[in-house]
Image (cartoon, rainbow, N blue to C red):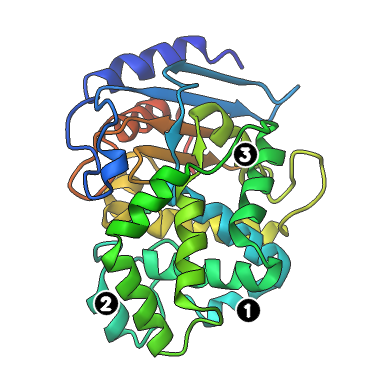
Amino acid sequence: MDYRAVLEEVAATARSAAGVGRVAEYIPALAAADPTAFGFAVADLGGQGGVDGVGDWEAPFSIQSVSKVFTLALVLAADGEGLWARVGKEPSGSPFNSLAQLERDRGVPRNPFVNAGALVVTDRLQDLTGDASSALRDFLRAESGDPRVDFDRGIAASELRHGHRNAALAHLLADHDRLANRVRTVLHHYYLQCSITMNCRTLALAARFLARHGLRADGTRLLTRSEAKRVNAVMLVGGTYDEAGEFAHRVGLPAKSGVGGGILAVVPGRCTLCAWGPALDPHGNSTAALAALDAFTTLTGWSVF
Ligand code: GLU
């Protein structure tokens, strides 16, 4: 498929939204991002598995919570379904860093994408690999084909210094006996995973296993078909903070967003998409990326519905 005309139209629509909203100032190292930047990439499964994009699609950004899709996949791949005893699969309906919800639910996070859930997933990945953040980085390098994918240690340090709420969530989990590793170890790997720098191109490439029903770039299987379905399903109900209903309504695809302004989306059996713009709406989703994905599914008619 020749995506050129679609990409140009997506960019024209999204540019009118780029800059609307606010960059994530609660992580000081992210506050310097240009709010008007915009990029979009599509990685196709057909033929050679081509990738194309528009705008700042090769500009680096902090993947932040988009990383949570990949750590979840790595844990499911190594550990099967046991994780679901420790983490739910329901929409949260609350802010992604809610302490009140975690306390009400006795230390069982609503889903793997709220921060508490991601901390539990990282804790498990640490048990399974001995070095959770490096396992994630190496996986992203292999799937994207780009050996330059790496941590931004400045961003990780900035989060560690200012992340009182994440520290509180981790301590609350520990208090409920939900972590196998020490709080500081889990936070260390969690912040490194969030700090990974990629671009629309490499993120779309790295996620193709979700569109390929679990098959990796080299043709080996990471997830069973059913596990891949489950990751996509949890993305649909919980991947875009407490705006997942609005997102499903407008875009109709499994997706995961991050406060760095990236949104990764999956069209199962067909392609992956990554849109980026640093300015966020009040829920934490990029306004430009949301507009771009909305335009893409409207133009192509591709959604899971
Ligand atoms: N590192 C960020 C935090 O823990 C990730 C938030 C996000 O992208 O949703 O607050």
Foreground of the two, 39 or 163: 163
Q: Element type at marker 3?
A: helix
Q: At label 2, which amino acid type do we have?
A: Gln
Reading the image, the residue beneath label 2 is 101
Locate residue 263: give its quadrant.
top left
Q: Tell me where residue 256 appears, x and y as whole percent.
A: 43, 48
Q: Tell me where residue 192 appears, x and y as whole percent.
A: 49, 53
Name the disc covering residue 82, or none.
1
Q: CA distance from mark 3 to mark 2?
A: 32 Å
Q: At label 3, which amino acid type do we have?
A: Ala
Query: Do tag 1 and tag 3 residues touch (Cβ < 8 Å)?
Result: no
Name the disc covering residue 206, or none.
3
Foreground of the two, 83 or 190: 190
**Left or right of residue 266: residue 114:** left
Q: CA distance from mark 1 to mark 3?
A: 25 Å
User: Would residue 271 be visible to someone looking at this image?
Assistant: no
Locate residue 21: give its quadrant.
top left
Q: Element type at marker 2?
A: helix
Screen quadrant of the C terminus: top left
